[in-house]
Image (spheres, rainbow, N blue to C red):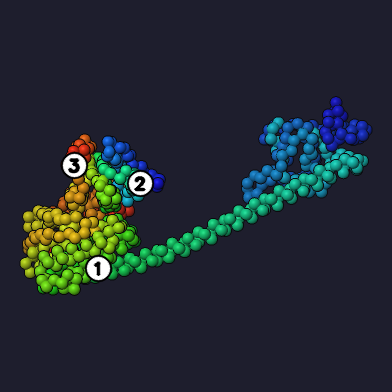
C-alpha cells in the first residue's frame, strides 16, 4: 500500500523496488489542516517532507511583513535544504489547503540519496532550478524596487522645485503686500476739533480694498474708501491703479483737467470723471470695476461734498441722540461706463457726529455658519458707541466683527475709515 | 468646463433662461462662469437670469453678469434679472447695478416684457 503510494511520487518513480520497500518502513505520514504550520523559519530541521495532496506556501518575513516565496503542490519536496547543509529552516511553510505529506528523517534521507545517485541528481537538479528561480525573482524584485525609488526620487525633486517656486511666489507676495501697505497713508491728518482713524485688513496676501486721505489745498481733506471687484492680486493691481490716478487727478487738477477752479465740487466731479474714463477706456476689456466713496471735508465748516460710485453708503452717527443717518446713493461703480458725469452731493458733519466709511467686508463678514455680520449689527454697534471718538469707535466695530467671525477665515477684505467731530 | 455646479439653462420662446445657484461667491462664480459664457455666446440674444435661489452675491458675481451683458449687447441681446431676494436687491440698489440691469419680480413678468413690442 505504502509502496504503491510512494511509487506515484515523481521522485521515487524510478527507485528500485528494494529501495522503495526500505523507504516505506522509515517514513511517517503527516496531515495538516489549511493554515497550519509545517515548520517555521529559524527552527532546527531534522525531517524533509514530500507533498502527497494539497499545497503549501513557502513564506518569509521582511520588516514584519509576510512575503510568499513560492507555493508547492503534490509531488514536491520541502525542507530538504536544512538536512543537506544542517542549517536552521530558511523559510516558514504553511498549508494553504488541507494537506497530506510524508515525513522523511535525516538518516533515511541521506541513505536514500547515497544509495540512489539518480535520485540525488534529480534532487540536485530540482534544488538548482529553485535557486535559479529565487535569483530571478530577487533580481526582478530589485529592478522593480529600483524603478520605484527612481520614480520617487524624481517626484521628490519635482516637489522640491515646486516648493522653491511657491516660496519665491510667497516672497513676491510679501513684497507686493509691503508696497500695497506703503500706498496707504502712514499718518492721517488730525485737524483741530476732529479725529481721523482708519484700517484695512486683507483676506489674502494682498487686498482689493483701500482707504485714502488726500490733503488738498485750502485745508480740504479728501476721504476715500474703495473696494475693487474680487480679491487678491488682480484686485490689488486695480487698487494700485485707481488710488494713484485718483490722488494725482485730485492733487493736480490743472495738469490733469486744465481746471482753474479748485472748489470741492469741481475736484470731485473732474477727478472721478477722469479716473472712471481712464479705467473704462484703458482696462475695459477686463470688466473690472471698483466701488468708491469720495468725500471732500472742509474741517472748518463740517461740510462734506461727496460722490458715491456704487459703494456702501457711509453712515453718520449723531453722538448726542445716538441716531444714525445714511449718506445718499450715487452712481454706478467706476470702470463700467465711460464718460460719466458725477453728481456731487452734500451733507454736514455737525459737532458730536461721526462719519463711518466702510467696505462690504464689514457687513458681509461671515462666521463659520456663513452668517453675515450684517448692517443690523453694525448699526447696533454704532448707536451703542455713539459717543466714542473715532479710534475707540472703530475698534468697537472691529471687535464686534471679530467676535462674530469667531476665528473663521476672513472671507473678504475689511476696510474702515472713521472721522469724528468733537 | 470646470467641475462643480452647473447652471440650469432652458430656452423659453427666444429667451435663454438661466437659473443661478444659491452662493455666488468666488468659488460659486468660478464653477459656473465658463458654462454661462458658452451658453450665452451660442445663444447670442435675450437672456434672463433667474436669481430666485441666490442668497449670496460677491462682487465677482456682479462682474460675471456685467460680462454677460457686455457680450450680448453688441449682438442686440440683453440680460435681465428676476427674483432677487431682498438682501440681494439691496446689494444691487447700493451698488447701483439696479440702474444697469432691468430687474423684474418674476419670470412671467420678465418674459412678457421681453415679448412686448417696447420690451
Residue at 18% over, 42% down: B119
Q: Nearer the viewer, residue A222 or A274?
A: A274
Neighbor class of circle 2 (other Cα within 10 Å; few <14, some 14-19, many 20+) is: few
Residue at 6% over, 67% down: A301
Which quadrant of the figure has residue A95? top right
User: Could you tell whether A317 is left or right of A110 in the image?
Assistant: left
Q: Nearer the viewer, residue A357 or A100?
A: A357
Q: Secondary structure at mark 1?
A: helix
Neighbor class of circle 3 (other Cα within 10 Å; few <14, some 14-19, many 20+) is: few
Instruction: Check residue B119 in the rendering and tell me which mark sits there, or answer none.
Output: 3
User: Could you tell whether A282 is left or right of A142 in the image?
Assistant: left
Which quadrant of the figure has residue A217? bottom left
Instruction: Check residue B38 in the rendering and tell me which mark sits there, or answer none.
Output: 2
Q: Earlier in the sequence, mark 3 or mark 2?
A: 2
Q: Are marks 3 and 2 on the same chain?
A: yes
Instruction: Say whether residue A72 is visible.
Output: yes
Instruction: Say whether residue A422 is visible.
Output: no
Q: Residue furthest top?
A: A1
Residue A371 position in % (x across, y down): 26, 46
Quadrant position of the C terminus of chain A in the picture: bottom left
Q: What residue is shown with label 1? A: A244
Output the chain of dot 1. A
Amino acid at each position: 500500500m505504502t509502496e504503491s503510494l510512494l511509487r506515484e511520487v515523481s521522485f521515487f518513480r524510478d527507485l528500485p523496488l528494494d529501495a522503495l520497500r526500505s523507504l516505506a518502513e522509515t517514513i511517517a505520514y503527516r496531515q495538516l489542516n489549511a493554515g497550519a504550520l509545517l515548520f517555521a523559519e529559524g527552527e532546527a530541521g531534522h525531517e524533509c517532507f514530500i507533498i502527497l495532496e494539497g499545497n503549501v506556501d513557502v513564506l518569509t518575513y521582511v520588516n514584519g511583513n509576510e512575503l510568499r516565496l513560492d507555493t508547492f503542490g503534490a509531488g514536491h519536496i520541502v525542507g530538504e535544504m536544512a538536512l543537506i547543509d544542517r542549517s536552521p529552516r530558511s523559510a516558514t511553510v504553511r498549508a494553504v489547503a488541507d494537506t497530506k505529506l510524508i515525513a522523511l528523517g535525516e538518516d533515511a534521507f541521506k541513505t536514500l540519496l547515497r544509495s540512489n545517485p539518480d535520485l540525488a541528481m534529480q534532487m540536485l537538479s530540482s534544488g538548482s532550478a529553485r535557486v535559479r528561480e529565487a535569483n530571478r525573482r530577487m533580481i526582478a524584485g530589485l529592478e522593480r524596487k529600483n524603478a520605484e525609488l527612481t520614480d520617487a526620487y524624481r517626484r521628490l525633486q519635482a516637489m522640491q522645485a515646486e516648493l522653491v517656486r511657491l516660496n519665491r511666489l510667497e516672497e513676491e507676495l510679501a513684497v507686493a503686500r509691503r508696497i500695497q501697505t506703503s500706498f496707504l497713508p502712514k499718518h492721517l491728518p488730525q485737524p483741530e476739533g476732529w479725529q481721523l482713524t482708519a484700517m484695512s485688513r486683507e483676506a489674502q496676501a494682498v487686498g482689493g480694498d483701500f482707504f485714502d486721505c488726500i490733503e488738498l489745498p485750502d485745508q480740504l481733506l479728501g476721504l476715500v474708501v474703495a473696494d475693487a471687484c474680487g480679491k487678491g492680486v488682480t484686485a490689488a493691481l486695480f487698487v494700485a491703479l485707481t488710488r494713484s490716478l485718483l490722488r494725482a487727478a485730485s492733487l493736480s487738477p490743472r495738469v490733469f483737467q486744465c481746471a482753474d477752479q479748485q472748489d470741492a465740487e469741481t475736484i470731485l466731479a473732474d477727478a472721478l470723471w477722469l479716473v472712471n474714463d481712464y479705467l473704462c477706456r484703458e482696462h475695459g476689456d477686463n470688466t473690472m470695476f471698483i466701488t468708491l466713496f469720495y468725500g471732500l471735508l472742509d474741517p472748518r465748516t463740517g461740510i462734506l461734498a461727496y460722490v458715491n460710485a456704487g459703494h456702501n453708503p457711509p453712515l453718520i452717527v449723531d453722538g448726542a441722540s445716538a441716531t444714525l443717518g445714511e449718506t445718499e446713493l450715487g452712481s454706478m461703480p467706476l470702470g463700467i461706463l465711460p464718460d460719466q458725469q458725477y453728481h456731487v452731493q452734500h451733507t454736514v458733519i455737525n459737532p458730536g457726529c461721526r462719519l463711518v466709511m466702510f467696505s462690504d467686508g464689514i457687513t458681509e463678514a461671515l462666521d463659520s455658519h456663513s452668517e453675515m455680520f450684517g448692517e443690523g449689527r453694525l448699526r447696533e454697534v454704532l448707536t451703542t458707541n455713539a459717543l466714542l471718538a473715532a479710534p475707540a469707535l472703530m475698534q468697537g466695530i472691529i471687535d464686534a466683527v471679530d467676535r462674530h467671525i469667531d476665528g473663521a477665515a476672513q472671507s473678504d477684505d475689511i476696510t474702515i475709515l472713521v472721522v469724528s467731530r468733537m | 468646463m470646470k467641475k462643480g455646479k452647473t447652471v440650469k439653462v432652458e430656452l423659453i420662446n427666444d429667451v435663454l433662461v438661466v437659473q443661478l445657484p444659491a452662493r455666488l461667491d468666488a468659488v460659486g462664480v468660478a464653477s459656473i462662469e465658463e458654462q454661462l459664457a458658452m451658453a450665452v455666446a451660442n445663444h447670442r440674444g435675450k437672456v434672463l437670469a433667474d436669481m430666485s435661489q441666490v442668497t449670496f452675491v460677491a462682487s465677482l458675481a456682479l462682474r460675471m453678469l456685467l460680462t454677460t451683458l457686455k457680450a450680448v449687447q453688441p449682438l442686440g441681446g440683453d440680460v435681465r434679472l428676476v427674483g432677487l431676494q431682498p438682501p440681494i436687491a439691496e446689494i444691487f440698489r447700493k451698488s447701483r447695478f439696479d440702474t444697469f440691469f432691468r430687474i423684474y419680480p418674476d419670470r412671467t413678468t420678465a418674459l412678457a416684457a421681453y415679448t412686448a413690442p417696447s420690451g
